[in-house]
């Protein structure tokens, strides 16, 4: 359960923005979307590997630039 303490005189929009940010960080929506269809473990591992290679390439390009 996410609890957002609202400070005295705090704007509701600001508190709602904090709630949305905190909710997004929990990853609930991402997990729900991922569970819509079954993904074989081998396919998931392959995707994670491809993502890791992509991130490494981006970091390498950033170091060179």
Image (cartoon, grey):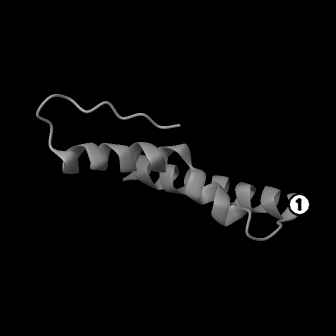
Q: Residue furthest left?
A: 9
| Residue 45 image offset from top left, x and y in percent | 81, 56
Quarter holding residue 49: bottom right
| Residue 4 image offset from top left, x and y in percent | 36, 35
Residue appearing at x 82%, y 66% in the figure: 39
Residue appearing at x 72%, y 55% in the figure: 48
| Residue 53 image offset from top left, x and y in percent | 65, 56
Left or right: 25, with 41 as reference point:
left
Q: 41 above or below 10?
A: below
| Residue 65 image offset from top left, x and y in percent | 36, 53
Residue appearing at x 29%, y 49% in the figure: 17
Q: 3 above or below 64?
A: above
Label 1: few (<14), some (14–19) or many (≥20) C-alpha neighbours in 10 Å = few
Quarter holding residue 18: top left
Residue toward you, 39 or 12: 12
For label 1, the residue is 42
Element on which disc 1 rests: helix
Count of numbered labels shown in the rendering: 1
Q: Residue furthest bottom?
A: 37
Left or right: 5, with 29 as reference point:
left
Residue appearing at x 59%, y 52% in the figure: 28
Quarter holding residue 19: top left
């Amino acid at each position: 359960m996410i609890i957002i303490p609202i400070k005295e005189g705090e704007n509701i929009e600001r508190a709602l923005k904090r709630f949305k940010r905190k909710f997004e960080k929990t990853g609930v929506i991402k997990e729900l979307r991922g569970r819509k269809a079954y993904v074989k473990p081998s396919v998931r591992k392959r995707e994670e590997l491809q993502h890791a290679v992509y991130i490494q390439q981006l970091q390498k390009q950033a170091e060179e630039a």
